[in-house]
């Protein structure tokens, strides 16, 4: 009986090694003196240490390896003896006189390997004799190590061809038969329930030895496909099925799959698969079958030349039927097992039959059938397998358009929870981004957005409050990038599409994103708007529109759609974002020469500014955006431009803080002077804006003096001076040298005033401005002459 104490086991191992080394020493001395009788005596005593039952398989292996090394030296001695004239037959009979059976059999196997090599007797007879005698050891540990020793020392001495090879291979199978039974021998040992775990551990250690011996069998050169198919595989499978032990069956089936060549598995697929339904119900078939399909998938991927073999044996059909029978036979198989099998089968199908989408869809359909009635999957491991299953076609085809042809693909996604749906949606989007996939029809876009609906809207009533904010932003930014991808940058490619179809794509995207709720709209509406504006700009141009009359109406239709889309941001609320988008649309309408559309977008922007934007900082930002956009507009007639300009200057003068008022008012001066448009150069109104800005700056100085006792910085005056210089250089006759000189003197006086508070930044700004004036004066010519009257 094995002993629990680790320390005791170490002591027994040390004692066994010491006894083995002591007898090995005397054996070496006998070998050196060519004393055969003493050599056999001490070698038998040395091998008696292997009779112990006190060691676990792991510890026993250490003792065995030391004995193995010594036996190799003894084998060399036996070879030398035969060269010196000693009869190998006499040696073979002599070692059988050892007192104990285990040492006797180790010595017999050692002499037997020399006997086979000498060819004095048929190898089949010697090997058969050895195999039969090895049956005398029935203890699981000692028996397996003895058989392992026999297989290791005889494998390189077997004949390669002919009937002897066939018989020798049969002998190895006979050798493997008791090994397969002994592999589960420990499970039959009686003992307290508390020792069950220890016995299971010991059996797990032993099975590696069995696998090693099966590997030796697979390496015999004479085991060709015919022998494997007719003899080796059926005999081994028979023993696996008959052993009735779940752990041994699982491991041995895995050994068969791992040690024999891929082409053998392919040609004997039906035989191998036929054994699976006969295994114990508790065997982890999913793992074994998955590894078989993984090996075959890698085999198919290794070379295109082997693919016809898969077609010839109808591998997909056989695997598909086998999986169906296994799942049917094991009605209580966890959903994880079924999904794992289908995932492996799909991977196999994509490698072997990449052109057969119907096969891939058939696998997905079978998975859906298994999942039906299960509801949403709650097992994390099962959901990971679902993600692997759904990711496989994406990884293979690198094209979501191809994947969308799989009718059962969306059905599988219905069985995962909202979090897993998001994970899969991110995988899909990343695939599209990586491969720069273009989706050209509204139907496909709709199908795609149904697949990624976990990112588009809340599923299953999931509350957004439970989502990490950073994760949410990353997800929505991914959706935004996807929306941008739907617009093709290649104008020639785009013109191949029907205008109505492109509008349908925009409408389809809009329909989906508007269901996302106020939290998502600020992320998804802007990319839709800019993608649509890109389409508008591509459709305009000097060349004749290839769509004819229908195409000419497209920009208006898009603008109408955009107006309705931006209005949805009111409910978020996101007035600043909506205002920015209105101004972008106005600029696009300006480029399309659509004055009424551009005016309407500006009107909406002004309404937002008046009714929704109340924060002073937001107002400052908004008014500068309005001024900058309006300054670039050329489509407006005089009346419309005056109305919009008057509103902008009015808003500027009503800002809360005087410095903000001043800067907004002098910015409005650019609305009356546009360089590339002669009809938009009104010098007098520019001067009025600048003078008004001066008054506001002066009022700001007075307020600062009243509240703080100092006039504050002269920065505003220096900024206005720079505006004077800008328009002076642009040729505005209303801005003359005298006005600039007067402003310089005003700033100088303010800086020298006792009430002025020091401001190094303002001083540096003013000094830099004066240096610029001096530089312009030194240029000479017309420029120098123009700046000459200004004294700095």
Image: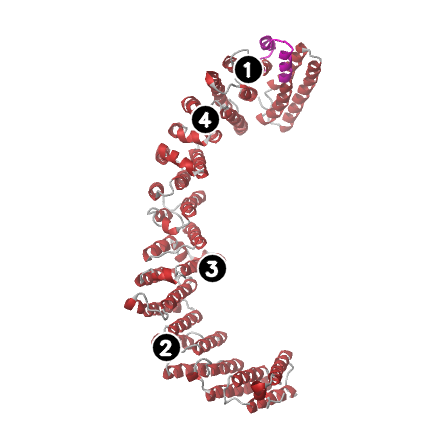
Q: Residue at x 43, y 25 (%)?
A: 225
From the viewer's perspective, is the residue at label 2 or at label 4 nearer?
A: 2
The label on residue 116 is 1
How far, Cα to Cα, is label 1 from label 2? 102 Å
Instruction: State the residue position of label 3.
Output: 473
Q: Quadrant of residue 343?
A: top left
Q: Are discs 1 and 4 less than 8 Å apart at CB?
A: no
The disc, 2 or 4, on the residue closer to the chain's N-terminal end is 4
How far, Cα to Cα, is label 2 from label 4? 83 Å
Q: How far across and down, in percent of the image, does residue 39 sit?
A: 67, 13
Q: Quadrant of the N terminus?
A: top right
The disc, 3 or 2, on the residue closer to the chain's N-terminal end is 3
How far, Cα to Cα, is label 4 from label 3? 53 Å
User: Dot 4: within a 10 Å radius of its alpha carbon, few (fewer than 14), some, or many (20 or more) residues?
Assistant: many
How far, Cα to Cα, is label 1 from label 3? 74 Å
Q: Quadrant of the C terminus?
A: bottom right
Q: How many marks?
A: 4
Would you place residue 788 above or below residue 37 in this image? below
Kindly tell me whether residue 743 is visible in this rendering: no
Q: Dot 1: what SS? A: helix
The front one of 87 and 619 is 87
Instruction: State the residue position of label 4.
Output: 245
Answer with left or right where residue 767 lies relative to residue 294. right
The label on residue 599 is 2
From the viewer's perspective, is the residue at label 4 or at label 3 nearer?
A: 3
Q: How far across and down, in percent of the image, does residue 72 sit?
A: 62, 20
Would you place residue 146 above or below residue 443 in this image? above
Colour convention: secondary structure
The disc, 1 or 3, on the residue closer to the chain's N-terminal end is 1
Q: Residue at x 52, y 17 (%)?
A: 138
* Magenta segment: 74-102
């Amino acid at each position: 009986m094995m002993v629990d104490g680790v320390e005791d086991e170490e002591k027994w191992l040390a004692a066994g090694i010491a006894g083995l080394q002591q007898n090995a020493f005397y054996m070496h001395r006998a070998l050196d003196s060519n004393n055969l009788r003493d050599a056999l005596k001490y070698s038998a005593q040395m091998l008696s240490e292997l009779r112990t039952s006190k060691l676990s398989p792991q510890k026993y292996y250490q003792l065995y390896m030391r004995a193995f090394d010594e036996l190799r030296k003894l084998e060399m001695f036996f070879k030398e003896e035969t060269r010196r004239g000693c009869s190998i037959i006499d040696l073979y009979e002599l070692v059988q006189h050892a007192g104990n059976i285990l040492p006797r059999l180790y010595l017999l196997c050692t002499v037997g390997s020399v006997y086979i090599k000498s060819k004095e007797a048929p190898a089949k007879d010697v090997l058969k004799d050895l195999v039969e005698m090895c049956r005398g050891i029935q203890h699981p540990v000692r028996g397996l190590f003895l058989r392992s020793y026999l297989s290791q020392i005889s494998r390189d001495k077997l004949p390669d061809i002919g009937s002897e090879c066939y018989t020798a291979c049969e002998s190895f199978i006979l050798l493997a038969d008791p090994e397969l039974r002994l592999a589960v021998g420990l499970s039959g040992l009686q003992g307290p329930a508390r020792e069950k775990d220890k016995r299971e551990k010991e059996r797990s250690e032993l099975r590696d030895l069995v696998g090693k011996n099966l590997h030796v069998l697979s390496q015999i050169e004479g085991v060709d496909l015919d022998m494997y198919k007719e003899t080796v595989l059926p005999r081994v499978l028979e023993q696996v099925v008959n052993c009735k032990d779940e752990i041994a069956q699982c491991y041995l089936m895995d050994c068969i799959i791992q040690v024999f060549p891929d082409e053998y598995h392919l040609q004997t697929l039906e035989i191998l698969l036929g054994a699976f339904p006969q295994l114990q119900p508790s065997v982890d078939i999913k793992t074994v079958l998955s590894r078989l399909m993984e090996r075959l998938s890698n085999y198919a991927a290794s070379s295109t030349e082997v693919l016809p073999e898969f077609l010839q044996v109808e591998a997909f059909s056989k695997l598909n039927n086998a999986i169906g029978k296994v799942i049917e036979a094991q009605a209580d198989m966890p959903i994880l097992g079924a999904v794992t099998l289908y995932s492996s089968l799909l991977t196999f199908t994509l490698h072997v039959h990449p052109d057969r989408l119907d096969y891939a869809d058939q696998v997905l359909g079978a998975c859906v059938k298994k999942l039906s009635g299960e509801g949403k999957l709650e097992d994390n491991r099962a959901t990971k397998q679902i993600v692997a299953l759904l990711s496989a076609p994406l990884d293979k085809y690198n094209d979501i358009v191809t994947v969308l042809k799989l009718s059962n693909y969306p059905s599988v996604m219905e069985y995962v929870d909202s979090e897993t749906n998001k994970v899969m949606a991110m995988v899909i989007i990343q695939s599209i981004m990586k491969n720069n996939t273009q989706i050209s029809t509204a139907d496909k876009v709709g199908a795609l957005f149904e697949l990624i609906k976990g990112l588009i809207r809340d599923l299953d009533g999931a509350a957004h409050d439970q989502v990490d904010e950073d994760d949410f932003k990353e997800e929505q930014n991914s959706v935004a990038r996807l929306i941008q991808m739907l617009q093709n940058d290649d104008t020639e490619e785009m013109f191949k599409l029907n205008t109505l179809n492109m509008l349908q794509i925009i409408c389809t995207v809009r329909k989906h994103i508007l269901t996302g709720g106020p939290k998502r709209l600020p992320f998804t509406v802007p990319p839709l708007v800019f993608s649509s504006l890109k389409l508008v700009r591509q459709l305009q141009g000097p060349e004749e529109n290839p769509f004819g009359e229908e195409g000419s109406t497209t920009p208006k239709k898009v603008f109408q759609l955009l107006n309705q889309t931006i209005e949805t941001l009111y409910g978020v609320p996101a007035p600043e974002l909506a205002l920015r988008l209105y101004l972008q649309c106005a600029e696009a309408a300006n480029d399309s020469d659509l004055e009424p559309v551009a005016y309407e977008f500006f009107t909406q922007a002004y309404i937002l500014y008046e009714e929704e934007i109340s924060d002073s900082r937001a107002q400052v930002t908004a008014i500068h955006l309005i001024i900058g956009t309006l300054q670039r507009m050329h489509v407006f007639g005089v009346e419309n431009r005056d109305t919009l300009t008057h509103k902008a200057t009015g808003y500027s003068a009503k800002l809360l803080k005087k410095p903000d008022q001043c800067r907004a008012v002098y910015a409005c001066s650019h609305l009356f002077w546009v360089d590339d448009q002669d009809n938009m150069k009104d010098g007098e109104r520019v001067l009025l804006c600048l003078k008004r800005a001066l008054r506001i700056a002066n009022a700001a100085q007075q307020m600062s003096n009243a509240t703080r006792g100092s006039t504050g910085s002269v920065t505003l005056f220096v900024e206005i001076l720079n505006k004077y210089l800008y328009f002076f250089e642009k040729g505005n006759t209303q801005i003359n040298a005298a006005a600039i000189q007067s402003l310089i003197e005003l700033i100088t006086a303010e800086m020298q005033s006792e009430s002025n508070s020091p401001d190094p930044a303002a001083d540096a700004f003013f000094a830099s401005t004066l240096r610029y004036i001096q530089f312009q004066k030194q240029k000479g010519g017309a420029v120098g002459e123009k700046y000459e009257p200004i004294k700095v």
